[in-house]
């Protein structure tokens, strides 16, 4: 148990030295915002599910730009790296899910064009 307490203290000191806020944040409104962001980090990539459904169920890719979806995928990578470097869970979840969804769409476009 002593080791856990020491680790927690070390983590708290690290956050203070890096001028990071406590997590979970002591302010209820900020905690709520943290939770909302985490929920939306899953919901937003899920908005591509209807497009994925159309691509694979109906093999329909007309009107979809392969170049645009590739650029979207490339654009996610810096934000994913940023989230990993800063250990920001909502950013990591959001960008991993976006990248997966975009790759699925790219594969569908390549298969059915």
Image (cartoon, rainbow, N blue to C red):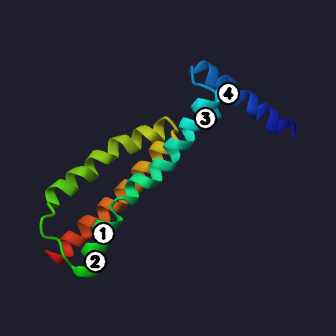
Specify whether residue 89 is in view.
no
Query: Which label sits in the foreground, 2 or 3?
Result: 3
- Residue that badge 3 annotates: 31
Q: CA distance from mark 1 to mark 2?
A: 6 Å
Circles 1 and 2, Cβ within 8 Å, touching? The answer is yes
Q: How many residues crowd mark 4 within 10 Å: few (<14), some (14–19), many (20+)?
A: few
Q: Residue 52 has which mark?
A: 1
Res 112 → quadrant: bottom left
Helix or strand or loop: what does disc 1 sit on?
Answer: helix
Res 2 → quadrant: top right
Res 3 → quadrant: top right
- Of the numbered discs 1 and 4, the one sitting upstream in the chain is 4
Helix or strand or loop: what does disc 2 sit on?
Answer: helix
Circles 4 and 3, Cβ within 8 Å, touching? The answer is no
- Of the numbered discs 2 and 3, the one sitting upstream in the chain is 3
- Residue that badge 4 annotates: 26
Q: Residue drawn at (64%, 25%), measured in percent from left and top?
A: 14
- Of the numbered discs 3 and 1, the one sitting upstream in the chain is 3
Q: CA distance from mark 1 to mark 4?
A: 40 Å
Q: Residue 69's x, y, as percent? A: 21, 57
Q: Residue drawn at (35%, 56%), measured in percent from left and top?
A: 99
- Residue that badge 2 annotates: 56
Drawn side of residue 104 relative to residue 68, left or right: right
């Amino acid at each position: 148990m002593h080791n856990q307490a020491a680790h927690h203290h070390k983590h708290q000191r690290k956050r203070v030295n890096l001028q990071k806020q406590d997590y979970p944040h002591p302010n209820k409104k900020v905690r709520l915002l943290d939770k909302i962001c985490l929920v939306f980090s899953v919901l937003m990539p899920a908005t591509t599910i209807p497009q994925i459904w159309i691509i694979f169920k109906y093999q329909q890719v007309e009107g979809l730009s392969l170049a645009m979806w590739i650029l979207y995928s490339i654009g996610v990578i810096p934000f994913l790296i940023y989230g990993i470097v800063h250990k920001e869970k909502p950013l990591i979840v959001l960008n991993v899910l976006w990248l997966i969804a975009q790759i699925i769409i790219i594969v569908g476009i390549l298969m059915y064009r």
